[in-house]
Image (cartoon, helix red, strand yellow):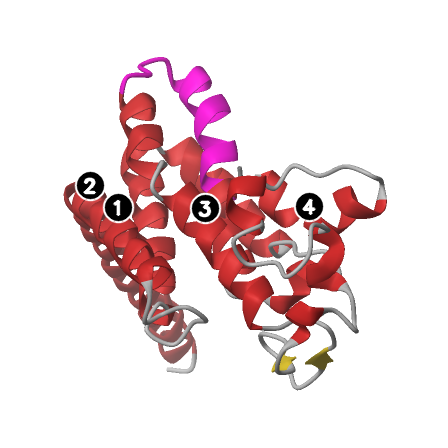
Amino acid sequence: KTNIIRDYLEDYVDGRAFWPQSVWKSYACSNDLGEFALPTSHGAGSLLPVKGGEVVAKGVGVQALMCLNHLVADALELVPYSLEYLERVQTPSIYRFCAIPQVMAIATLVACFDNPLVFTGVVKIRKGLTARLIVACCDGPNAVHFWFRQFAEEILAQSDTCVGAGGPVGKRLKEACKRILERTEKRSQNWSGKQTQKRLVLGAMTALAVSSVFYGKLQSHR
């Protein structure tokens, strides 16, 4: 579902259409899915700023973003099932194989959520974040839950200001995020606690190393 959401423009240009008609026809003013990306479309409505910048996204309006956020909410509602499946995987190598695309998917949902760029270009997560997520999947379930929780919190924080926040879509987004937060709370806290301990130990070791170097230099000058 995430890939279908993200690849809206690429698929439409290539003559493919995977967005469900039962959803997008509820928001479009025509029978053409490409309406959301047309500069002169009925769905243009008011011009909206692109997330993270001041550039105006021409042709991307309220109807398009309402539809997008509807699909994001629909995908988020499946996250608890994804986490339940991952918890049943016991072999570490297989767990990593299954967890990586799931964590990448929710990260991509965050990038697509309420984002006009979905209709005008390509939305991708940063390479640095990708690397961190792969490492997290190698660290195990607690780290995976931590990142799912982080992304759910990010969407929840924007759910009051996104297009459709006051309607059914906004309600679904909030409920989906809250279910994810409930599901990931315990493991996420365990992971955060271990990371705090690691940082404290690393800080103590660094301080000890600096002190040793300073003491050695002090002794050499006597």
Sequence-first disc among 3 and 1: 3
- Type of amino acid at the residue the image marks with label 2: Arg
Q: CA distance from mark 3 to mark 4?
A: 15 Å
Q: Nearer the viewer, mark 1 or mark 4?
A: 4
Report which residue position mark 4 lands on: 7
Quadrant for residue 207, please give it: bottom left
Q: Which residues are magenta?
A: 88-104
Report which residue position mark 2 lands on: 183
Sequence-first disc among 4 and 2: 4
Whether pointer 1 and pointer 2 mark residues with C-beta atoms closer than 8 Å, the reply is: yes
Question: Would residue 220 be seen by someone viewing this image from the given angle?
Answer: yes
Residue 49 is situated, as x and y percent measured from the top left of the image, at 62, 81
Residue drawn at (52%, 41%), measured in percent from left and top? 22
Q: CA distance from mark 3 to mark 2?
A: 15 Å
Report which residue position mark 3 lands on: 106
- Type of amino acid at the residue the image marks with label 1: Ile
